């Protein structure tokens, strides 16, 4: 079996990360993951609480930079920006991170891939379409998933299904 999946993890290990939030000892609850996701999505894309640094365009009026959620859902966000978000989420999910943080990182990683597929018809990963479709389907069914991201995952899943 190939170990070229996300972060060098096997499919089984990635599945374990995607399974976070199910009943089990010591794992974060759905409510905890939902709260952490809302916090991450509502943080700015430029100075995210987890040190996510992405050059998102600032409003012309000099106002606050957009939230990560707005950047992920905005049709005008470039594929390059989505690639940077994906890469940063992947890098920040490494060893020493809590299960809660890894769940959020995995979700942001997949959201950036989904946004590139949906908004630009560009695949910013080497994962096969069937693997992506399964991951998107798994994420969109999570009870803690943001409804707009769930819709994005649904659309991306349809593109992968082709």
Image (cartoon, rainbow, N blue to C red):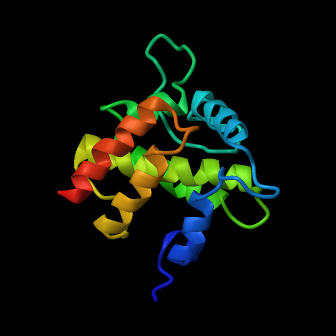
Residue farthest toward the front in the current orientation of the protein: 23
Percent coordinates x, y for residue 57 in the rendering: 45, 29
| Closer to the camera in the image, 11 or 96 | 11
Left or right: where 146 falls relative to 136: right
Q: Residue at x 56, y 35 (%)?
A: 45
Q: Quadrant of residue 119?
A: top left
93 vs 63: above or below? below
Left or right: where 142 falls relative to 82: right
Q: Residue at x 69, y 64 (%)?
A: 94
Quadrant of the frame with the C terminus: bottom left
Residue farthest toward the bottom in the current orientation of the protein: 1
Q: Residue at x 48, y 34 (%)?
A: 56
Residue farthest toward the right in the current orientation of the protein: 26
Percent coordinates x, y for residue 19 in the rendering: 60, 58
Residue 150 appearing in the image: yes
Residue 79 appearing in the image: no
Q: Residue at x 47, y 79 (%)?
A: 4
| Closer to the camera in the image, 13 or 116 | 13
């Amino acid at each position: 079996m190939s170990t070229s999946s996300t972060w060098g993890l096997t499919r089984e290990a990635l599945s374990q990360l995607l399974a976070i939030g199910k009943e089990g000892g010591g794992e974060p609850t759905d409510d905890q993951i939902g709260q952490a996701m809302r916090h991450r999505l509502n943080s700015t894309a430029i100075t995210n609480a987890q040190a996510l640094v992405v050059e998102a365009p600032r409003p012309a009026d000099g106002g606050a930079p957009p939230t990560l959620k707005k950047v992920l859902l905005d049709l005008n966000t470039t594929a390059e920006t989505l690639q940077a978000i994906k890469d940063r989420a992947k890098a920040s999910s490494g060893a020493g991170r809590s299960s809660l943080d890894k769940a959020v990182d995995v979700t942001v990683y997949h959201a950036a891939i989904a946004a590139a597929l949906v908004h630009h018809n560009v695949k910013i990963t080497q994962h096969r379409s069937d693997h992506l479709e399964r991951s998107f389907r798994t994420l969109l069914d999570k009870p803690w998933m943001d409804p707009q991201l769930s819709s994005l995952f649904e659309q991306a899943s349809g593109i992968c299904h082709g």
